Amino acid sequence: MTKTPGINHEPVTAWLAVNIEGAVAPFDFEFIVGGHSNLTYKVTAADGAQFVLRRPPLGAVIATAHDMAREHRIISGVGQTAVPVPAALGLCEDDSVNGAPFYVMNYVDGVVLHSAEDSEAATDRSARAAISRSAVDVLASLHLVNPDDVGLGTLGRKEAYLDRQLKRWSTQWEKTKTRDLAKMDQAHGLLVKAKPEQRYTGIVHGDYRLGNMLLDVASGQVNAVLDWELCTLGDVLADVGYLLNRWIQPGEEVITGATEAPTMVGGFSTREDLIAAYTGRTGFDVGNLDYYRAFQNWRLAAIVEGVLARYKGGVMVDDTVDLNQYKAQVEALVDESLRLLQPN
């Protein structure tokens, strides 16, 4: 039997056969997504049925950052709504089975668009227009869900989302920064000063972008939204700001070091059309979206700086990375944040 890193074949096989309805041993485990986030495997049963198994990264030491029970709870709750997510099938919290907790969900077919090249290869203009409509409709559907109605009312604090986020990522920046960057402090000060009142509270995905969606490229529909590990409760307009930042339009300059720009090819909706569709569904007042876009650029700068610090600290495996590219990306993100906060 071929060994799969992160999978203890015999005990996991035994657990699946007992706990997952329709799971027929033996199983084939295929590592499909990994990195510094949770690890994902496609599981193929003896009769051809397919499932997906998610577990924390190998060697993860911060359990709260890779909480399988929490992620399983989220997709179980969201799965009760119109938002398309894989069905949660089972949760194993017994570390003796696989060295760490894991959960199993159903396998959803679809295409993920990570780049402009992916969009060119997998879609035509009509599909891109439909994908745009579906992506914003799904986000609106998520934001209209009352967390209490789907068992997620205690997932996190509902109030003071921006206060919490600004404090968290400012602290993260101070702990991981590789050099002083006055622009980060300047942007933080402006974000604190201009912070809007939280008007619309709900489920915040935290990483809502095309790269986290399985798409039916023939119909242009979102088959499933993935990667809920950053999900929390709070100000839903933060998701809108994040999506708009990742929705790069044709002819725009991509922020230095950023690689994901599937919308750069023609045929996708404009940001203005996305906003109109979102407000049409939700009725929300989104007149201050530049603030949320600025906040998300600043937040992402803090995240990228943390990755840079790990590379500099020698704890990342890949030694071929151009660290100057990470530095440039951080500075470009902060510059864009300041541009949005000081438009004149």
Image (tube, rainbow, N blue to C red):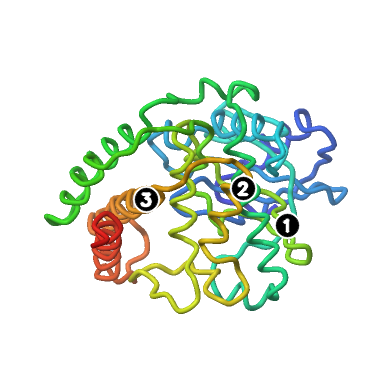
Q: Residue at x 78, y 34 (%)?
A: 17
Q: Which badge, 3 or 1, comes first in the chain's sequence?
A: 1
The tag on residue 296 is 3
The local secondary structure at tag 3 comes to helix
Quarter of the image for the C terminus: give it. Answer: bottom left
Of marks 2 and 1, which one's residue comes earlier in the chain? Answer: 1
Q: Where does the image place residue 219, in percent across and percent down from the top left?
A: 78, 63
Q: Which mark is residue 221?
A: 1
Residue type of the residue flagged with mark 3:
Gln
Tell me if mark 3 has few (under 14), some (14-19) or many (20+) residues whose alpha carbon lies within 10 angstroms of its own: many
Tell me whether circle 3 and circle 1 mark residues in contact (CB < 8 Å). no
| Between discs 3 and 2, the one toward the N terminus | 2
**Horizontally, is 208 left or right of 306 in the view?**
right
Q: Residues within 10 Å of mark 2 (few under 14, many from 20)?
A: few
Q: CA distance from mark 3 to mark 1?
A: 26 Å
- Vertical relation: 279 (above or below) 15: below
Residue that carries the numbered disc 2 in the rendered image: 280
Tell me what residue is drawn at x 65 percent, y 29 percent.
Answer: 77
Picture residue at 70% right of the left edge, 34% below the top: 81
Q: Amino acid at mark 2?
A: Gly
Instruction: Kindly indicate whether the residue at mark 2 contacts the one at mark 3 (C-beta within 8 angstroms).
Output: no
Q: Is residue 334 above or below residue 117?
A: above
What separation in Å lies between label 2 and label 1 (alpha carbons)?
19 Å
Give the secondary structure at mark 1. strand
Measured as percent of width and height from the top left, residue 11 is found at: 66, 34
Q: CA distance from mark 3 to mark 2?
A: 23 Å
Crowding at dot 1, Cα within 10 Å, few <14 / some 14-19 / many 20+, comes out as many
- Give the residue at x 64% y 22%: 149
Q: At label 1, which amino acid type do we have?
A: Gln
From the viewer's perspective, is the residue at label 2 or at label 1 nearer? Answer: 2
Q: Is residue 308 left or right of residue 253?
A: left
Q: Nearer the viewer, mark 3 or mark 2?
A: 2
